[in-house]
């Protein structure tokens, strides 16, 4: 069983999706702790409903960024966390945490990286009137959404899309591919060759998480 630690700043819908997939038996994992930088994050309420330990760690309570992320790393290690999940954690992760969990931190980004990194990927895509958008699960490195790409899903984008309408379409796919990426990791099917992620197994299984664009027009 894979032990997860989740970091979240907001509503925690991806956190909820992961918990649902654990409780259904799809994921052979457990969430040891949810850590939030926001005391009013709804993700905390989700953790309470599922009897998952939660911590609020405000960076303002620490002398600097290194101290903050060193403390987070210690809290995760104390609980035996093997894989760190960023489920809407709205901060750039510090070096202390990255060094402790190198290639063991996963993030979900609402764009097809390397396009539109950073905040408001959905808005950027809508403003550029792209025809295809989507989401990306990637490992976290020191850059802004620059880590090795694990898996992606595409969704259609329309000329009248807004950040909100496109975001809703993308979020549906986030809830599918994030648990799937964790499942691949838990089954030992992910390896890194330089900065390329190689996924072992049946290509048809992999395609389930990457459905053709014409299947996503809802």
Image (tube, grey):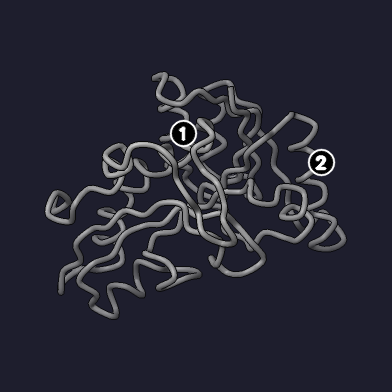
Q: Which residue is mark 2?
A: 74
Marks 1/2: CA–CA distance = 25 Å
Q: Quadrant of residue 63?
A: bottom right
Q: Where residue 81 sits in the image (x, y, percent)? A: 69, 33
Dot 2: element: helix
Whether pointer 1 and pointer 2 mark residues with C-beta atoms closer than 8 Å, the reply is no
Answer above or below: position of 117 versus 38. Answer: below
Q: Which mark is residue 199?
A: none
Q: Quadrant of residue 142?
A: bottom right
Position of residue 19 in the picture relative to residue 202 (left or right): right
The N terminus - image quarter? top right
Answer above or below: position of 87 versus 77. Answer: below
Please report whichever mark, 1 or 2, sits nearer to the chain's N-terminal start. 2
Residues packed near mark 2 inside 10 Å, few (<14), some (14 to 19) or many (20 plus): few
Residue at the image position 17 percent from the left and 51 percent from the top: 216
Position of residue 53 in the picture relative to residue 178 (left or right): right
Answer above or below: position of 120 versus 215. Answer: below
Residue extending furthest toward the right: 63
Residue at the image position 24 percent from the left and 75 percent from the top: 130
In this orientation, which residue lies closer to the viewer: 162 or 83? 83
Dot 1: element: helix
Q: Which residue is mark 1?
A: 183
């Amino acid at each position: 069983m894979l032990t997860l630690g989740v970091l979240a700043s907001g509503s925690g819908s991806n956190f909820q999706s992961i918990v649902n997939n654990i409780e259904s038996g799809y994921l052979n994992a457990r969430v040891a702790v949810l850590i939030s930088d926001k005391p009013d994050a709804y993700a905390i309420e989700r953790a309470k409903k599922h009897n998952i330990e939660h911590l609020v760690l405000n960076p303002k309570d620490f002398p600097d960024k290194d101290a903050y992320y060193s403390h987070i790393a210690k809290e995760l290690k104390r609980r035996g966390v093997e894989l760190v999940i960023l489920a809407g954690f709205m901060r750039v992760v510090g070096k202390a945490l990255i060094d402790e969990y190198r290639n063991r931190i996963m993030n979900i980004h609402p764009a097809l990286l390397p396009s539109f990194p950073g905040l408001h990927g959905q808005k950027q895509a809508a403003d550029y009137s792209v025809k295809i958008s989507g989401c990306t699960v990637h490992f976290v490195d020191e850059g802004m959404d620059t880590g090795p790409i694990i898996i992606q899903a595409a969704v259609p984008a329309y000329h009248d899309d807004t950040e909100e309408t496109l975001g809703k379409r993308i979020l549906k796919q986030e809830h599918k591919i994030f648990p799937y990426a964790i499942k691949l990791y838990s089954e030992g099917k992910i390896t890194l060759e330089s900065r390329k992620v190689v996924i072992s197994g049946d290509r048809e299984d992999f395609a389930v998480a990457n459905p053709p664009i014409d299947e996503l027009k809802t």
